[in-house]
């Protein structure tokens, strides 16, 4: 039976979302902001984040996967591409967790082909334990050193996304 160790409560998540939403609203004032959620893990975070951003913006999604169980396969598979025109627009990639960095590096390279005005990254969790590439996280709600994290959109083999807080999963 898996064990769930609480790392970040619902209340802490809501507090950080408000702060990040305010900062994004200030930083992107008078810009053409498009939030691109990286599926599937970002959907809960993105839904709550968009409601904390007070400026006009659009939302799109990009599907990318590199995980099997608790390990990255090293191979990024794009399962959905954005529908919106991204050229000359300010793109904020919204990700559930920055782990190895490989997936977001490939996504950033892919989005650059659309000639956006700018690309920045917003991650719910910036985790450093397995970082393999140097890539900047411009906005992060939480920074963690290690653990396999589930809840609030983060999963283990498609399970536990529905948990309202963030937990370290012990198998």
Image (spheres, rainbow, N blue to C red):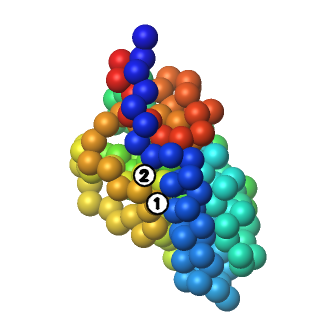
Q: Quadrant of residue 53?
A: bottom right
Residue 67 visible in the snapshot = yes
Residue 139 lies, in percent from the top left, at: 46, 67
Q: Quadrant of residue 56?
A: bottom right
- Left or right: residue 39 versus residue 100 is right
Residue lying at 32% horizontally and 50% vertically, measured from the top left: 144
Residue 110 lies, in percent from the top left, at: 50, 57
Does dot 1 land on a helix, a strand or a loop? strand
Q: Quadrant of residue 50?
A: bottom right
Residue lying at 42% horizontally and 17% vertically, measured from the top left: 2
Q: Is residue 166 above or below residue 109?
A: above
Quarter holding the N terminus is top left
- Left or right: residue 27 versus residue 82 is left
**Of residues 165 and 65, which is closer to you in this image?**
165
**Of residues 10 and 92, which is closer to you in this image?**
10
Does dot 2 land on a helix, a strand or a loop? strand
Residue lying at 45% horizontally and 46% vertically, measured from the top left: 8
**Label 2: few (<14), some or many (≥20) within 10 Å?**
many
Tag 2 near tag 1, CB within 8 Å: yes
Which tag, 2 or 1, sits closer to the chain's start?
2
Residue lying at 72% horizontally and 78% vertically, measured from the top left: 55
In the rendering, which numbered label is found on residue 125?
A: 2
Quarter holding the C terminus is top left
Circle 1 residue: 141
């Amino acid at each position: 039976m898996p064990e769930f160790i609480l790392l970040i409560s619902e209340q802490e998540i809501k507090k950080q979302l408000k702060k990040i939403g305010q900062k994004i609203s200030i930083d992107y004032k008078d810009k053409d902001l498009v939030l691109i959620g990286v599926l599937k893990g970002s959907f809960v975070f993105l839904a709550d984040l968009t409601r904390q951003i007070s400026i006009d913006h659009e939302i799109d999604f990009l599907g990318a996967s590199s995980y099997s169980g608790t390990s990255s396969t090293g191979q990024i598979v794009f399962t959905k591409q954005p529908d919106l025109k991204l050229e000359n627009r300010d793109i904020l990639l919204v990700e559930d967790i920055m782990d190895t960095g490989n997936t977001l590096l490939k996504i950033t390279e892919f989005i650059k082909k659309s000639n956006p005005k700018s690309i920045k990254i917003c991650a719910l969790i910036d985790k450093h334990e397995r970082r393999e590439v140097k890539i900047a996280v411009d906005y992060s709600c939480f920074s963690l050193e290690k653990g396999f994290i589930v809840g609030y959109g983060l999963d283990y083999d498609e399970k536990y996304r529905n948990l309202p807080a963030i937990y370290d999963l012990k198998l």
